[in-house]
Image (cartoon, rainbow, N blue to C red):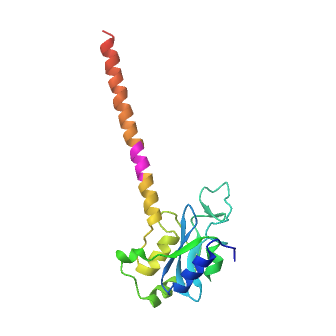
């Protein structure tokens, strides 16, 4: 177990966690998600060695998890303390406000039924999608939604900027032609 600045907090969280709860591990620029199954055990989607924290990126793959391309990942059952590293963890069942959770035993059964290598996509099938699917039967990732919104906003800005640039260019040409008389 890595020494954590959040050790006391994380011990408190794991004491309160119940089977079927979703755990969110704050990794700084992203969060990792897992399904708590009891006895300080979680099921989560990650790379071979971990979910990317302390992982190495291969230069020939833009998107990797611990050197493994994003098209494959592993659903695994691990001890909570092996997954937490030096992250701050929270029980995060906030999607309960919009989705009805399955009974705890069904959530745990669903998570355990997925053990092994599966496909991975950061926007469509990531660790948060996996955890939400186990709890609610719905693939849902707030992180991915925010990323897609950001990508759409950038795309819209580029398109609008291009339109404005073309309009201004046309206007300059008209002005130039008018001044040539």
Quadrant location of the N terminus in the rendered image: bottom right
Q: What stretch is highlighted in magenta?
A: 152-157
Viewer can see residue 95: yes
Q: Determine the residue positioned at 58% across, 77% down.
A: 9
The x, y position of residue 42, in whole percent, is 57, 82
Residue 18 versus residue 57 in the image, above or below? below
Residue 129 versus residue 16 in the image, above or below? above
In this rendering, would 131 be left or right of 65? Answer: left
Q: Main secondary structure of the magenta part?
A: helix
In this rendering, would 91 be left or right of 164? Answer: right
Asked if residue 73 lies in the magenta stretch, the reply is no
The x, y position of residue 71, in whole percent, is 56, 65
Q: Residue lying farthest top?
A: 181
The x, y position of residue 176, in whole percent, is 35, 17
Q: Determine the residue positioned at 41% across, 56% down.
A: 149
Residue placed most toward the observer, 41 or 91 = 91
Residue placed most toward the observer, 165 or 23 = 23
The x, y position of residue 73, in whole percent, is 59, 71
In this rendering, would 168 be left or right of 117? Answer: left
Quadrant location of the C terminus in the rendered image: top left
Q: Determine the residue positioned at 63% across, 76% down.
A: 7
In which quadrant of the rendered view does residue 162 lie?
top left
């Amino acid at each position: 177990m890595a020494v954590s600045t959040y050790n006391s907090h994380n011990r408190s969280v794991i004491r309160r966690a119940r089977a079927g709860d979703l755990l969110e591990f704050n990794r700084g620029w992203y969060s990792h998600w897992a399904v708590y199954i009891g006895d300080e055990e979680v099921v989560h989607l990650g790379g071979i060695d971990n979910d990317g924290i302390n992982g190495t990126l291969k230069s020939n793959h833009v998107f990797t998890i611990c050197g493994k391309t994003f098209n494959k990942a592993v659903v695994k059952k691990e001890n909570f303390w092996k997954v937490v590293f030096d992250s701050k963890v929270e029980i995060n069942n906030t999607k309960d406000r919009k989705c009805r959770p399955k009974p705890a035993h069904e959530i745990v059964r669903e998570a355990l039924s997925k053990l092994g290598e599966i496909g991975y996509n950061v926007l469509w099938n990531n660790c948060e999608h996996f955890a939400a699917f186990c709890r609610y039967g719905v693939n849902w990732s707030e992180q991915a939604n925010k990323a897609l919104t950001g990508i759409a906003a950038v795309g819209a800005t580029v398109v609008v900027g291009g339109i404005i640039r073309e309009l201004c260019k046309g206007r300059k040409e008209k002005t130039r032609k008018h001044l040539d008389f």
